[in-house]
Image (cartoon, rainbow, N blue to C red):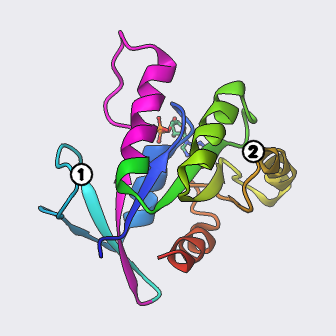
Amino acid sequence: NTNVVAIIGRANVGKSTLFNRLIQKRMAIVDDIPGVTRDRLYAQVEWAGKSFYLVDTGGFPNEDEPLFDMVGKQIDRAIEEASVIIFVVDGREGILPLDFRIAEILRRSNRRVIVAVNKIDEPMHEPLLYEAFALGFEDVVGVSAEHNRNIQDLLDKVVMYI
Ligand code: GDP
Ligand code: MG
């Protein structure tokens, strides 16, 4: 059983920063995982005695591609490969219409979804994360990928589902 956890979300919410933060000191480089494509870097993460493969589905932005097509591809990939999805939103910018569109697709996918409200850099920013509950998912955690806040809470939630 291959546990794949995918990080998705619109551009600039901090997916890659979060990917790097999550794998810090917890990763092993992965060459080959049965059943998953190999055009991206996957990392194996160990946490609380469990192990999963993390993937940043953000890929490489293509200037010619409409925003939603790009995000749409990530979502298709994530739904195909992953059993758990970390849906990253930007707590500073707030929840945008594109976030609601993503949420709608994820809801129909039957995957476990954890909303990571990123850029909650200080305790005083925490009220910003409540807006994210409107996306309709039960698991919402405020994090700061850049400032290393609540990353352990996020990992705890992820391993609950694997
Ligand atoms: P991606 O496009 O979703 O992969 O986003 P990136 O990881 O490339 O980050 C986009 C921007 O957000 C960069 O300028 C990051 O430095 C910034 N960023 C990422 N995480 C945080 C955070 O926790 N707090 C703040 N304030 N900025 C962040
Ligand atoms: Mg990125």
On screen, residue 133 versus residue 11, left or right, reads right
Q: Residue furthest top?
A: 64
Q: Nearer the viewer, residue 22 or 62?
A: 62
Query: Counting residues from the N terminus, which is met first, the one under dot 1 or under dot 2?
Result: 1
The residue identified by callout 2 is 135
Q: Is residue 54 magenta?
A: yes
Kindly state the secondary structure of the residue where label 1 is placed: loop
Which mark's residue is nearer the viewer, 1 or 2? 2
Q: Residue at x 49, y 19 (%)?
A: 67
Residue span colored magenta: 49-78
Q: Is residue 62 above or below residue 105?
A: above
Residue 22 position in % (x across, y down): 44, 64
Classify mark 2: helix, strand or loop: helix
Residue 53: quarter of image: bottom left
On screen, residue 149 above or below 94: below
Q: Which mark is residue 41?
A: 1
